[in-house]
Image: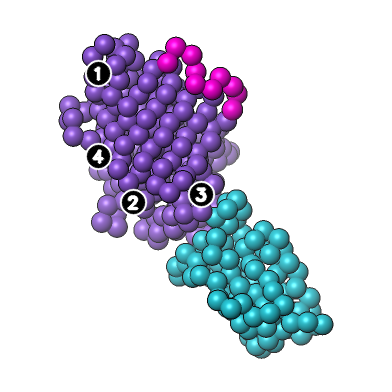
Chain colours: A cyan, B purple
């Protein structure tokens, strides 16, 4: 199976509040609240690190979850956010990582 | 006909309207009584063409678009353009208060967004030198809580609150935009002490609210008229920063004046 690379869209605004990442699409105002695991994937979505590596390093290790289950959940999460244009997905590393979205801690 | 100017100042932002139509000028003076400024030096100016028929007669909902610095606003009953860099614009409408009211709301929402403020579906009231905001959709109780306010309270609006940011602090300003009360708020301002999200319930109760929940509800009640990327980002940022400074809570209340004893 080919690798997937993910990058945050520049057409979003996001903010970490109370440990949850709030993400809003600037194109259609769709609003998402990410849980801790999804937030970890989101923050690691630099366009260069393969999704499989993000899952292994950021999810399995930090949240002590099984690789198979974590990979399946990560795939679903990425698919949903990419459907809304919030995450960009490619089978190659992004040449230029996504612009820093509006984000504040 | 001689061109005449009239300046409407809401939230410390004077907007000058130029028109040759005496009837429309008087209509504006009556509609915005209490918010008319004697100043002829406004940062924002519009030329108003008063038409005998609407520019685009239709049931079209409001549409706001930006091309560069130019905002274009239209609905069946008005057509307006505003250059946000120069602060100048042009409005076409018939002589009615509803069209100019809509244009002013849109323009103020754009002006506020670039300063880190916003317009909010909320009643606001000043008491003991502090402003309290009561946000909610139609039917949530904005007008009811305003009606129940004690005699020493000053009503800023029962419908659309004007939240302005200055030097990192937030102020609620009076507006002429009214709901069921059908009366303008007082033209004054005070620092915002608290934001309450209204619910009807079996008892008077204030409940804490998580910041993510508050942000979601705040954005749901914020007025923004354009699906413009830059604007959406600004409003999201403004809402988040507001919640860093102002506590937000849920307020369940009975239609009973005793609820005001809890609001401090």
Q: Which residue is mark 1?
A: B3
Residue B247 visible here:
no
Residue A15 within the magenta-colored segment of the rendering? no
How many numbered circles are shown? Answer: 4
Is tag 4's residue or tag 1's residue first in the polypeptide sequence? 1
- For the residue carrying disc 3, how many other residues have a C-alpha within 10 Å: few (<14), some (14-19), or many (20+)? some
Q: CA distance from mark 4 to mark 1?
A: 19 Å
Residues at discs 1 and 3 in contact (Cβ within 8 Å): no
**Disc sitting over residue B115 in the figure:** 2
Kindly identify which chain the residue marked by label 2 belongs to: B
Q: Quadrant of the N terminus of chain B?
A: top left
Q: Earlier in the sequence, mark 4 or mark 3?
A: 4
Q: Which residues are magenta?
A: B51-60
| Position in image of residue A1 (x %, y %) | 82, 82
Distance of label 4 from label 3 (alpha carbons)? 23 Å
Q: Do marks 4 and 1 share a chain? A: yes
Quadrant position of residue B16: top left
Residue bearing mark 4: B43
Name which residue lies at 40% across and 59% down: B241
Of B67 and A90, the residue lying toward us: B67
- Please tell me which of labels 3 and 2 falls first in the chain: 2
Which element is circle 4 on? loop
Distance from label 1 to label 2 (Cα)?
32 Å
Q: Residue at x 25, y 28 (%)?
A: B7
Within 10 angstroms of label 4, few (less than 14), some, or many (20 or more) residues? few
The residue marked by circle 4 belongs to what chain?
A: B
Please state if B123 lies on the left or on the right of A31 as rendered.
left
Instruction: Using the image as rendered, state which of residue B246 and residue B20 is in the foreground.
Output: B20
Question: Which residue lies under the disc numbered 3?
Answer: B228
Q: Position of residue B80 (x, y in %)?
A: 43, 31
């Amino acid at each position: 199976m080919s690798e997937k690379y993910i990058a945050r869209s520049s057409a979003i605004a996001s903010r970490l509040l109370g440990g949850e990442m709030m993400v809003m699409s600037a194109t259609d105002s769709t609003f998402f609240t990410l849980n801790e695991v999804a937030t970890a994937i989101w923050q690691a979505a630099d366009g260069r690190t393969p999704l499989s590596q993000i899952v292994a390093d950021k999810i399995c290790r930090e949240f002590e979850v099984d690789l198979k289950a974590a990979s399946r959940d990560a795939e679903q999460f990425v698919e949903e956010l990419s459907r809304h244009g919030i995450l960009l997905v490619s089978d190659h590393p992004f040449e230029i990582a996504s612009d820093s979205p509006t984000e504040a801690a | 006909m001689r061109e005449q100017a009239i300046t409407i100042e809401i939230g410390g932002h004077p907007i000058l309207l130029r028109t040759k139509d005496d009837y429309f000028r008087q209509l504006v003076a009556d509609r915005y009584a209490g918010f008319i400024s004697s100043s002829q030096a406004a940062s924002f100016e519009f030329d108003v063409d008063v038409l005998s028929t609407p520019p685009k007669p239709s049931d079209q909902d409001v549409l706001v678009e930006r091309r560069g610095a130019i905002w274009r606003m239209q609905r069946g009953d008005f057509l307006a353009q505003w250059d946000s860099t120069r602060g100048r614009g042009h409005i076409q409408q018939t002589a009615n208060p509803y069209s100019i009211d809509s244009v002013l709301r849109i323009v103020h929402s754009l002006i506020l967004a670039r300063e880190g403020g916003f317009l909010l579906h909320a009643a606001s009231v000043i008491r003991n030198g502090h402003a309290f905001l009561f946000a909610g959709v139609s039917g949530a109780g904005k007008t009811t809580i305003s009606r129940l306010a004690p005699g020493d309270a000053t009503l800023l609006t029962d419908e659309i609150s004007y939240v302005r940011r200055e030097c990192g602090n937030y102020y609620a300003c009076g507006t002429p935009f009214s709901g069921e009360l059908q009366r303008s708020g007082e033209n004054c301002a005070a620092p915002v002490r608290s934001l309450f999200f209204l619910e009807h319930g079996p008892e008077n109760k204030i409940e804490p609210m998580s910041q993510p929940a508050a942000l979601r509800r705040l954005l749901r009640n914020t007025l923004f008229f354009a699906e413009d990327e830059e604007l959406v980002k600004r409003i999201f940022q403004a809402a988040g920063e507001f919640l860093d400074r102002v506590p937000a809570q849920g307020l369940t209340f009975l239609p009973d004046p005793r609820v005001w004893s809890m609001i401090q």
